[in-house]
């Protein structure tokens, strides 16, 4: 919205700064951070009053959670969404369709998560929407987004580490890309099990994809790096920056011991946002690298369930895998920080795909 002020730069040259993408990205991050820090205390108190006992804690989870996390309010993802959306609307170029796609997927997945959280809180149960209902709605949202994006960017799945090599999947690309968005949303959701565990890897991934979007959206950079350019994708740098600011504001309140949990409201929305950005920038496979921690968490659940159903035995002491290490006696803070380090290393590997070809 504020980017339109650049049109008045002929009358007031100082307004020319609003033309610069990097300036608006920095401003978006700071704006989202400040909004989150300002509204956070009041929102958390409101959630605490409305929810009473807070988020129901699974009785089959780690026993320590029944003692330390009972009474903590959930739906803290509302804080992230408000900060992210307001900041993006203020600083992004609203004539850019990719920005609206990311906002649509983020809010759509956030609404699904909110419905799930609301059912859990009101019924004092860890069971929310049925898995089938959630997936149907998520695929509908993702499918609509992917269809629109594919009209602009094509249906080729580009391969990292190779020069101009991609697989034109045709209509099947819609299925693959939709799965990327839905899978990302649910993978982040599974990761959100310890204080601060999910939000920092999301922030790291957002920084990484902000850089990727900036490079992909710049024809000169993309050509130099032998990448498939996507005109207009650079504007997603503002969205990613706003996501970083909103994430940092949430981490302020989610740092151990957490004052609030993001809930499915936040985790589904954030994962969906990352998936949408990956699809728009044609870096779907790179998302699996940058978000490798989320993939590991999801795979640990799949392996655990499959193993138990087929053999009656469990591979891990508890799934997702962060609970496995809790059961082994690792301190929660140790798990969280070590997983952050893994997320950072994976992000660096993901960024290396821009050059290593």
Image (spheres, grey):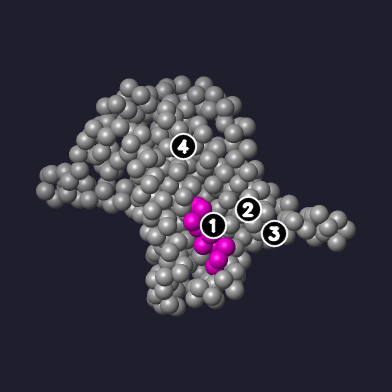
Q: Is residue 50 above or below residue 212?
A: above
Residue sticking out furthest to the right: 11
Q: Can residue 330 be seen?
A: yes
Tag 3 or tag 2, which sits nearer the N-term? 3
Magenta span contains residue 346: no
Give the CA distance from mark 1 to mark 2: 9 Å
Camera-nearest residue between 16 and 356: 356
Q: Specify start and end residues of the magenta stretch as a single range.
A: 206-216
> In the image, residue 319 lies at what x, y percent?
26, 42
Between circles 1 and 4, the one closer to the viewer is 1
Q: Which residue is mark 4?
A: 262
Between circles 2 and 4, the one closer to the viewer is 2
Q: Which residue is mark 2?
A: 25
Camera-nearest residue between 57 and 347: 347
* Res. 13 image quadrant: bottom right
Between circles 4 and 3, the one closer to the viewer is 3
Numbered circle sitting on residue 20: 3
Tag 3 or tag 4, which sits nearer the N-term? 3
Magenta: main secondary structure: helix
Tag 4 or tag 2, which sits nearer the N-term? 2
> In the image, residue 155 lies at what x, y percent?
46, 73
* Res. 22 image quadrant: bottom right
């Amino acid at each position: 919205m504020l980017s339109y002020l650049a049109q008045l730069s002929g009358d007031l040259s100082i307004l020319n700064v609003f033309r610069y993408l990097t300036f608006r990205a920095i401003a978006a991050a700071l704006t989202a951070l400040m909004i989150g820090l300002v509204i956070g205390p009041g929102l958390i108190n409101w959630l605490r009053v409305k929810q009473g006992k807070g988020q129901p804690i699974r009785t089959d989870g780690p026993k320590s959670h029944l003692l330390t996390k009972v009474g903590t309010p959930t739906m803290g993802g509302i804080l992230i969404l408000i900060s992210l959306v307001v900041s993006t609307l203020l600083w992004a170029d609203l004539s850019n369709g990719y920005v609206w796609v990311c906002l649509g997927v983020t809010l759509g997945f956030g609404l699904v998560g909110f419905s799930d959280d609301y059912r859990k809180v009101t019924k004092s149960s860890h069971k929310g929407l049925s898995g089938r209902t959630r997936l149907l709605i998520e695929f509908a949202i993702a499918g609509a987004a992917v269809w629109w994006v594919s009209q602009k960017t094509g249906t080729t799945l580009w391969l990292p580490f190779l020069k101009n090599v991609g697989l034109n999947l045709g209509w099947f690309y819609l299925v693959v890309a939709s799965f990327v968005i839905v899978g990302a949303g649910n993978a982040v959701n599974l990761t959100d099990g310890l204080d601060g565990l999910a939000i920092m890897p999301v922030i790291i991934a957002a920084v990484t994809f902000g850089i990727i979007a900036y490079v992909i959206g710049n024809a000169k950079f993309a050509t130099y790096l032998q990448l498939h350019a996507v005109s207009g994708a650079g504007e997603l740098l503002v969205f990613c920056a706003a996501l970083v600011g909103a994430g940092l504001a949430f981490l302020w309140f989610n740092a151990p011991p957490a004052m609030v949990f993001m809930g499915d409201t936040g985790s589904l929305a954030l994962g969906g946002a990352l998936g949408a950005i990956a699809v728009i920038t044609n870096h779907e496979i790179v998302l699996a690298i940058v978000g490798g921690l989320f993939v590991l968490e999801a795979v640990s659940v799949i392996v655990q369930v499959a193993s138990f159903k087929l053999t009656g035995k469990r591979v891990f002491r508890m799934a997702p895998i962060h609970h496995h290490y809790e059961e082994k006696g690792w301190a929660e803070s140790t798990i969280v920080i070590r997983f952050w380090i893994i997320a950072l290393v994976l992000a660096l590997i993901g960024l290396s795909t821009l050059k290593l070809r």
